[in-house]
Amino acid sequence: MKRGSRAGMTLMELLIAVTLFSLLSMGMLYAFRIGLNAYSKTQTKLMDNRRVVGAQRILEQELQSMVPVVVRCGMEETGPRTAFFHGETEAMRLVSTFSLQEASRGMAQILEIFVAPREDGRGVRLLVNEIPYAGPRAAGQLCTTPRQYLPVMASERSFVLADRLAYCHFSYLYVPLEAEPKPVWSTLFQGKTWPRAIRVEMAPLEPDPSRLQPVSMTALIRIHRNPEIDYGDF
C-alpha cells in the first residue's frame, strides 16, 4: 500500500521566514524610534516657544503694573519726597502689583529687574528679584538719595526671565528735569516722577529660525500722580 505524503517546510524555508520577520521587526522599531525622536524634538521646541512667550508676557505685565510709590530715601524721615524708581542701562527697580508667584492677585512686590553675565561667560541673562513691599519706609531703605540706589545683586532666588542673550539693555521715556515739554529716550532715567514707557532691547546669542526668539519690547506706563502731593501711605 502507498503511504500518503505529509505537507511541511524545509529548514531553508524556516530560516528565510525568520530572517524576513527579523528585518520587518527592525524596520518597524527603527520607524517607531524616528517617530519618538521627532515627537520629543517637537515637544522641546514647543516648550521653548511657550517659555519665551510667557517670559516676555510676564515682563510686560510687571512693568505695566507699576505702582507710583513715593518715598523718603535713607533713614531721614524728614527728607525730600521722591518717586520710587531706579532706572539704569542694565538694572531697574520699581514697585509692581504683578508677581511671578501670585500674578496680579497677590500683594505688591519690589521688583529688581537686571542683566547678569552667564556662568560660562557666553552671553548674558535677564533676571528678576521679588521683594515683598512693606510700605514706603521700607522701600526708602533701598535708596540713599533720590538719584542713588543700592546695587542690585543676583541670588539663588533670582528668577531667569530670558537666557542665552547676546545683549540686553533698558531705556526709558521721560520728561527731563529741565522742564522741556518733549519726552526723550535715555538709557539712564533722570526724570522727576516715573517713566512714560520702558523699552527692553535684547537679542539671542545663537539665532535659530526654527524657534521663537527673545525680541525687544516696549511697555507703556500709565501713572497719574504728583510726588509733591501727600496721598497718604500706599
Image (cartoon, rainbow, N blue to C red):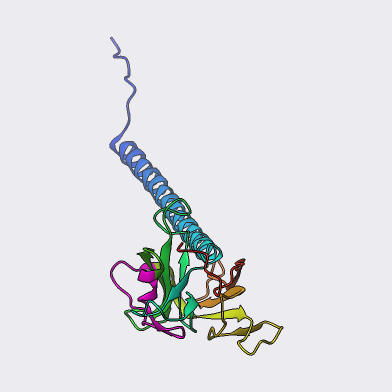
- Please tell me whether residue 190 is drawn above or below residue 60 in the rendered image: below
Instruction: Please state which of residues 9 and 226 is positioned toward the viewer in this rendering.
Output: 226
Residue 155: name its quadrant.
bottom left
The N terminus, quarter of image: top left
Residue 153: name its quadrant.
bottom left
Q: Is residue 157 toward the left or the right of residue 58 in the image?
A: left
Q: Is residue 103 magenta?
A: no
Q: What segment carries the magenta color? A: 137-159
Q: Is residue 225 visible?
A: yes
Percent x, y of residue 207: 52, 75
- Residue at left offset 33%, top offset 81%: 120
Residue 14: name its quadrant.
top left
Instruction: Please state which of residues 107 and 217 is positioned toward the viewer in this rendering.
Output: 107
Percent x, y of residue 5: 32, 19
Percent x, y of residue 171: 56, 81
- Please tell me whether residue 18 is drawn above or below residue 209 in the rendered image: above
- Residue at left offset 69%, top offset 87%: 180
